[in-house]
Amino acid sequence: MSSQLLPLNRRNWLRAAGVCLGLPLLESLTRSSALAAEKATAPRRLAYLYVPNGVNVSQWQVSGSGKDYELSRTLAPLAKLRSEFTVISGLNHENATPGPDGGGDHSRATAVYLTGVRPKKTGGSDIRNGVSIDQVAAQQIGRFTRLPSLELSTDGARTTGRCDSGYSCAYQFNLSWASPTRPVPAEQNPRAAFERLFGAPEGGEGGAEARQQMRKSVLDFVRDDARSLAGGLSAADRDKLDQYLTSLRDVEKRIEQAEKTPVPLPDFKRPTGIPETYEAHIRVMFDLIALAFQTDSTRMITFTLANDGSNRAFPDIGVPEAHHQLSHHRNNAATLEKIARIDRYYVEQFAWFLERLRAIPEGEGTLLDNAMVLYGGCISEGNQHLHSNLPLLLAGRGGGTLQPGKRLQAADPTPMCNLHLALAQRVGVKLDRFGDSTGVLEGI
């Protein structure tokens, strides 16, 4: 297929050799005659970032209220971003509690977090959960983007087998559910996620396989189109386009480097494209999320930094023990200190991601201004497997619909689904109730 520049529309694409490459919002294009009648408004995007096993509550909790609250020790890495996020307290997931189902809190935590529905306790194929809020949104607004949603994880996907106290692994390893019986497996390999975002559509010519065989970059296929487009842009937009293409190439290089230096992992064959370190894995996924939002390839993303029940160790920060085992701390001071280190490590990655989004201009603001990023998990205190007063941070401004920079203390107990409902409505989802919601969370 010959290279050609597609007609301009609100979502602009460069296409060549079966490759679709979304573009950031360019003011020069929005002023074109083809768009004269359309206001150049950046879309709102929503990302859910999940962390496992609960936190050291005393080190996580902040003091004070409103804009006058004081950051805790765990949240200190976010000090320079204080105006960009809200600390939310008092939200609960009642359907993640044991009830008559007994053990299995980690499986229930993951399954309930975005659904608000108590999953059927089974280790067989007769799984049943609710539809997750990201997939409800994808079904309504996914038609506006190339991908309705994107699901990422640093852990492998599993949909069968028994995992936690008689629950199917489908519950513990999947945040997203397209239907009560169909989880949406998350992608662990950055290369595969990248190809899904920027490779050929299914059935299209060229694409991922051909490009890898020829050792070429996605950019090689669109270079001519990019040059043709750049000629009609303002100086500011040319800089923006160049910044975007440079960041895209940087991600590609990092993935290619990871493929050249595979690190064997215990018990299973290591997929190619996964970076050598956990931090590098997290951050390349964050880069992909930023690119996906910047190009409006999708507006709905879930990223499981580790599945609940994860026994990952953190020797780089002085914690060689397994995370899940540490979470059952029995109030041991030394163990609690190690949990606090892990909590802070994850918050540092979150801060890095927010800085990444804040550094990308879009419209009259930044990518972070138009995003909503929910960070948290479905267990607060790991020793008792509590699903109340969940550790939650909400970042971004949602295109002006959020007012960050404060602590929001909800009346305890308030269903977590009230927050899910509020965020979904802000991205354009028509929905009055979700899960066990009792209304829309106010004050965010």
Image (cartoon, helix red, strand yellow):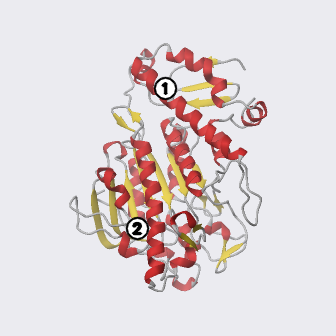
Front-most of 115 and 326? 326
| Residue 192 to residue 205: above or below | below
Q: Which residue is drawn at the image coordinates 50% and 42% (left, top)?
A: 290
Q: Position of residue 291 (x, y in %)?
A: 52, 39
Element at label 1: helix
Disc marking residue 391: 2
Crowdedness near tag 1: few (<14), some (14–19) or many (≥20) residues, C-alpha within 10 Å = many
Q: Which residue is drawn at the image coordinates 45% and 78% (left, top)?
A: 336
In the rendered structure, the answer to whether residue 178 lies left or right of residue 363 reads right
Distance CA(mark 1)–CA(mark 2):
38 Å
| Residue 273 to residue 38: above or below | below
The numbered mark, 1 or 2, whose residue comes first in the sequence reads 1
In the rendered structure, the answer to whether residue 185 lies left or right of residue 439 reads right
Quadrant for residue 203, please give it.
top right
In the rendered structure, the answer to whether residue 33 lies left or right of residue 53 reads left
Check disc 2 and give the amino acid type: Pro
Check disc 1 and give the amino acid type: Leu
Disc marking residue 241: 1
